[in-house]
Amino acid sequence: MTDAQSRDAGDLARRLAENAEAVCRHYLSAGRRHGNYWLVGDVHNTPGRSLYVRLHGGPDGRGRAGKWTDGATGQHGDLLDIIRESLGLLDFRTVADEARRFLCLPHSEPRSAPDRRNIAPLSSGTADAARRLWAMSRPLAGTQAETWLGHRDLTRLSDLSSLRFHPDCYYRADADSPTETWPALIAAVTDLDDRVTGVHRTWLARDGKGKAPVAMPRRAMGDLLGHAVRFGAVSDVLAAGEGIETVLSLWEVMPDLPLAACLSSAHLAAMAFPPTLRRLYVLRDDDPAGDHAVTTLQARTQEAGIECLVLSPRLADFNDDLRYLGRGAMRAILHPQLAPQDVARFLLPVAH
């Protein structure tokens, strides 16, 4: 391993260790938490209790988070090793790119890239850049972002303080591509204290009636793990899903229900629970990754003493239900899936 790779490995291992439990839940899903440790059979995610991963460092500085030992074999390492062994990866670059994918960091530079040793750490840089982009964005009213959301039948936009618009948001497909500018819907990713930790960008066509004709019209940046795009104030009940438009579809018929868009199935599975949360609704996406997120959240909520209910759309997702079936059908689809006390509390009457 080169010096640059060693620095990169150290930085990635530290970031993973800061989110050790989320890493374990994703790559060692056959295990479970026991106190300050994640217990599983081995690095290949076999059920058992031989391998233990420390989730938090000790107050005296001993016992670093993310370090693991297999009591049966004597193997030990960090969370990069867990990713490599659990997925059967071979070279460092592939392992590092998988770690970046999980952490929602940009992929590594090409092999011919210049030395970056004097550049600030990526996490603070991308989070700071996300906050700058958020500060430069403006309200939705009268913009292509409002047009885009309207084309998704999303019309309750006046109270959406977590969404803004940027008229000329930079886009570059990769390091070798030219920079373009497109209008973009900007969503603030926040922690439980409402601090902006990242942003999600949806680049739009010039008329706002579709996504921009680029290779990847949706991207996130900043510190995302455990955080979400939030709609409504935190309370004892929360509904969480992956996509912004999917989550906002519930806002159309349940505007008083707090919502969270976690942006991916991995981040949905690793979402942080508000301390006041007593019941979580999970918006299920009809795919294997969505099913895994539901299973993971059901286990986590059971451990935390939180009731977990799954909301399933009739079509591919709730935005399809809203667009093709309408608000009345949405209400009928959701009504039997809600806890009885939440029907009167959150679901708008038919007249609306």
Image: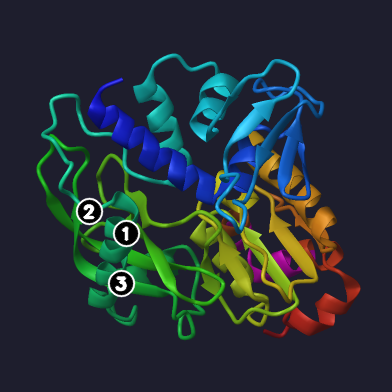
22 or 80, which is in the foreground?
Answer: 80
Which residues make up the magenta segment? 321-332
The three-letter code of the residue at mark 2 reads: Ala
The three-letter code of the residue at mark 3 reads: Trp
Relative vertical location of residue 225 with respect to residue 11 in this rendering, above or below: below
Residue 132 placement: quadrant: bottom left
Residue picked out by circle 2: 120
Residue 246, percent from left and from top: 56, 59
Q: Secondary structure at mark 3?
A: helix
Residue 225, percent from left and from top: 51, 54
Q: What quarter of the picture does the N terminus occupy?
A: top left
Q: Is residue 184 visible?
A: no
Residue picked out by circle 3: 134
How far is disc 2 from disc 1 in space, using C-alphas? 8 Å
Q: Is residue 102 rendered magenta in the image?
A: no
Judged by depth in the image, the label closer to the viewer, 1 or 3, is: 1
Q: Is residue 331 rendered magenta in the image?
A: yes
